[in-house]
Amino acid sequence: MIKTGIIILAHGSRGERSAVPEILKRITEGLKRYLSPETRITGASLQFNHPNLDEAAEDLINEGIKQIIISPYFLFTGRHITEDVPENIVNLQKRHPEVQFTLTANLGFHESLIELMAGNIIQASPDLSPDITTLPVAPDKIEEQSLKIVDRILSPELMGNERTVAMRVVHAGGDPSLANLIRFSPSAVEDGIAALKKGASIFTDVRMVSTGISKRLVEGFGGSVICALDDIPAAKNKDQNLTRAAAGMYRLDSKLNSTIIAIGNAPTALLAVLDMIDHRNLRPALVIGMPVGFVQARESKAALIKRSISFITIEGTRGGSPLAAAAVNAILRLANAK
């Protein structure tokens, strides 16, 4: 059942050969990969092309849709965004008080757009790529140079220990787009450092995460690295319809209190932790939630962000064991340096 209508709103352009309708069609089709199937996505133009905003909204309303989200495909916040579009929405709301209208932010300034533009420029002139060299790089300089490149990618608003952790995660992933997806709860890194200094152990969802964590540093603080899959039979727990990672988290239960939980593979493990937080009063010191994939990964991390606990996560489908381990190791190094 379609519950929500989404209108991608472009400015529009004159002329019979306007490319706007085709561009909007490609955008709306592309968005379907990322949004719930319970949404109906359509394009509209503010002027010159059809359907316009009113026409697109009326079409959705005629289908019985009671919630409409309008997302402007605009780069700049000019009068169209500040005056014309809000005025259109007010008029629509007056005609249809039973419908909820929501206006999102326009594209505007976003780091990913800068990355795209830089890519276009380098494609046109490869010699403009930073640090381009065909000479061998000394082994002890590779990481140093990589981190310098990552540091330029990160937003200047990301500072202090959070920046240090983010640098390590982006470096481990080799993916500049991660820079815009990492999310920290307030004091997350500091809470992790404090827990480690008290001897907190680190629990992981899979062995690949635990293998990547520096056990020497953890043991130096008096803690240990434990995988939830340890002592779990190879067969899935069919009676409860749980994955092994989720069953492992449930088995640990109160042992997870005041610890650091690092999840880099299984969304079901993260959902199990959140269930225990909600219904068993579980209180870990920090949850590093970075499961990867297309089934429940995005949703589990979105649910984590809504909890009033300390967390570090990566929005969307990206993630993985190397990234979760990199976040843990960055916090370990920060704790060891203090």
Image: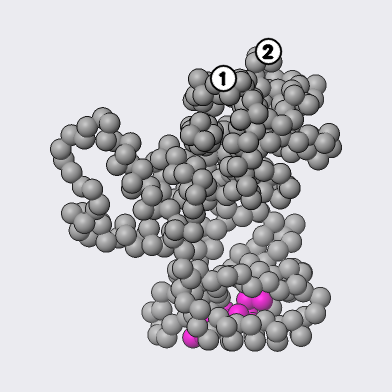
Find the distance from the CA under tag 2 to the CA under tag 1. Answer: 21 Å
In the image, taking residue 120 as reference, residue 230 lies left or right, namely right
As displayed, is residue 212 above or below residue 313? Answer: above
Q: Quadrant of the N terminus?
A: bottom right
Label located before the other in sequence (2 or 1): 1
Q: Which residue is mark 1?
A: 219
Residue ID at (58%, 42%):
189
> What is the secondary structure assignment of the residue under circle 1?
helix
Residue range of the region highlighted in magenta in the rendering:
46-57
Q: Residue furthest left?
A: 135
Residue ID at (23%, 48%):
131
* Residue 287 seen in the figure: no
Q: Are marks 2 and 1 in contact (CB under 8 Å)?
A: no
Q: Nearer the viewer, residue 83 or 146?
A: 146
Residue ID at (53%, 39%):
319
* Residue 288 percent location from the top left of the image: 61, 37
Residue ID at (59%, 48%):
184
Q: Which residue is mark 2?
A: 231
Q: Nearer the viewer, residue 271 or 257?
A: 257
> In the rendered structure, which amino acid carries the disc numbered 2?
Asp
Q: Nearer the viewer, residue 107 or 283?
A: 283
Residue 185 is covered by the magenta coloring: no
As displayed, is residue 248 above or below residue 109? Answer: above
Mark 1 neighbour density, 10 Å: few (under 14) some (14–19) many (20 or more)? some
Where residue 20 sits, quadrant-wise, is bottom left
As displayed, is residue 103 above or below residue 302? Answer: below
Which label number is shown at residue 228? none
Where residue 272 sits, quadrant-wise, is top right
